[in-house]
Amino acid sequence: MRRKDKEITNVNDKVAIISKCKVCRLGLSENNYPYIIPMNYGYTYINEKLTLFFHGAKEGRKIEIIKTNNNACFEIDCDTKLIVAEKPFNYGYEFKSIIGFGKIIFLETNEEKTNGLNKLMKQLTEKEIEYSFTEEELNRVCVYKMEVEEFTGKQKILNKEN
């Protein structure tokens, strides 16, 4: 990372940002062109391993890209705030962000899908509820995970009163 003064090095601080944010931009590559999709997500951080969970339609461009190239990146950000200054070039933006890389894996069993969907629901609702899903519901949706190989955190805080 170029700006070491903005780097978040403590893994617990990075996981706290992942826990707080609600939208993840998933970056894929198709024929050397980027394809970025904003998505809701869930996550686990177990034994120093970050895993992100996603769901969506069983077909479409995103799914076709993943089938041919499951390498992916992601970006998550929150706590954004424009800081106004007297002169335009002195404006700034506060933020906290996480960027990482890994591989996408489709979840196949109903148990895996249920687990992934429950991680998504926990992130969305901020509630520890274990939902159950019928086989028909699970068959209608594609659930997949990203096994994150590396991730970094960055923040810029201009207004220390936050």
Image (tube, rainbow, N blue to C red):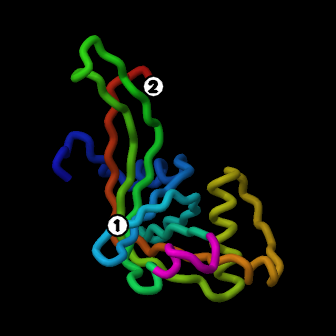
Above or below, 74 against 127 in this view is below
Q: Quadrant of the C terminus?
A: top left
User: Magenta span covers which residues?
Assistant: 56-64
* Outermost residue to the top: 86
Out of 93 and 130, give the one closest to the viewer. 93
Identify the amino acid type marked 2.
Asn
* Residue identifier under label 2: 162
SS class, disc 1: strand
**61 in the magenta segment:** yes
Which residue is identified by label 1? 34
User: Residue 159: x, y in percent?
Assistant: 37, 22
Eyeballing the image, is 40 above or below 112? above
The residue shown at (81%, 82%) is 136
Residue ID at (44%, 79%): 65
Residue 43 relative to residue 25: left or right: right
Q: Could you say which quadrant of the image residue 42 lies in? A: bottom right
